[in-house]
Amino acid sequence: MPKQPFLFIALTFLLAAAVAGANVATQKFKEAPQFYNSPECPSLTNDEEEVDPEEDGNQICSDRAVHVAMTLDTAYIRGSMAAILSVLQHSSCPQNVIFHFVASASANATVLSATISASFPYLKFQIYPFDDSAVSGLISTSIRSALDCPLNYARSYLANLLPICVRRVVYLDSDLILVDDIAKLTATNLGDSSVLAAPEYCNANFTAYFTPTFWSNPSLSLTFANRKPCYFNTGVMVIDLDRWRAGDYTIKIEEWMELQKRMRIYELGSLPPFLLVFAGEIAPVDHRWNQHGLGGDNFRGLCRDLHLGPVSLLHWSGKGKPWARLDANRPCPLDALWAPYDLLQTPFALDS
């Protein structure tokens, strides 16, 4: 009798995973065009090395590749497909882009892989299982339930998940599109010591990201002493994985999450630990590479305009997602910029 509750929980977990897999299976996506390198693109292998073009394993470690990391799940698969297409379409060397997808270990990786391969038959990618239990015990409830998903914290574990030979990676959220060559972002100068680079927003009210409990405790607020901390969005980052590993930054982030469990020092999911560890010490990136906030705030998801200046990447961070608003026939004006990258095969679409 005592085992019944555990059996019930196990069955419930398996049923949820099965339903999630079914949701992916019911979404049919169109095949994207194949994109080719320009003549100036470097080879991912040594010139004298004979390579089977169907084998990507020997290219996964290439420093000449553009390595892109994203999370992959059923809830955001439609956004992920659009993001992938935008990266390839605007890349000068699309065949040199290697995607590293992180998916929950409970997800059906076979279905996810088949979905990606069906739309992008020539894509170089790997899927890495993420053990939700590794972080679930550290997660505190935040202002929006979507921010509490364990997979939302996977960006903190990329250095552990990706092969040790991958030295630099661009992390991208699934609710964005690029309209510029990702190689430019990858080439960001991290200087002599910076671990990551991202656009900084120093006009934002930085104190609002932490609670009065944090700021009233001198031992905590002194964290930012001798630093000029600014807000940055963790949905677009260039990360030096070698420096991350050498500095044990995953452990440092986890230590702040453990403190958050004991005393509430922030409200906003996975972002504040990154700010605590890195704010004021990251390499700058032009704001054009993260026109974020297009999904509105975390409560109502109202429409927003672009920030002033040029645009290389549009990011629908916030509650409102373009695919959901388009489906509901209540799109924001800027959602029309996302729509051309939507690969969802609708029931009424005609085969071309």
Image (tube, rainbow, N blue to C red):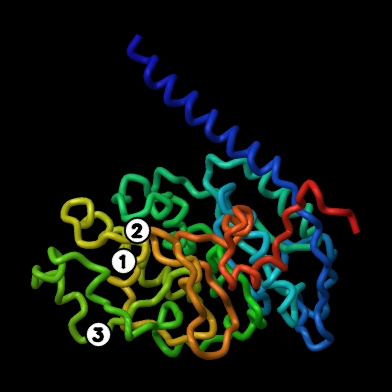
Q: Is residue 82 visible?
A: yes
For label 3, the SS is loop
> Image check: 236 left or right of 215?
right
Q: Is residue 93 above or below residue 67?
A: below
For label 1, the SS is helix
| Badge 3: residue crowd in 10 Å (few <14, some 14–19, many ≥20) | few
| Badge 2: residue crowd in 10 Å (few <14, some 14–19, many ≥20) | many
Q: Is residue 257 above or below residue 282?
A: above
Q: Nearer the viewer, mark 3 or mark 2?
A: 2
Residue denoted by label 2: 269
If you read the primary sequence from the N terminus, does the residue marked by circle 3 or circle 2 appear first? 3
Residue denoted by label 1: 272
Query: Image quadrant of residue 132?
Result: top left
Q: Nearer the viewer, mark 3 or mark 1?
A: 1
Residue denoted by label 3: 227
CA distance separating discs 2 and 1: 7 Å
Q: Is residue 110 visible?
A: no
Given the image, on which type of amino acid does mark 3 rest?
Arg
Question: Front-most of 269 and 261?
Answer: 269
- Residue 25 place in picture, x, y as percent: 70, 41
Given the image, on which type of amino acid does mark 2 rest?
Gly
CB contact under 8 Å: marks 2 and 1: yes
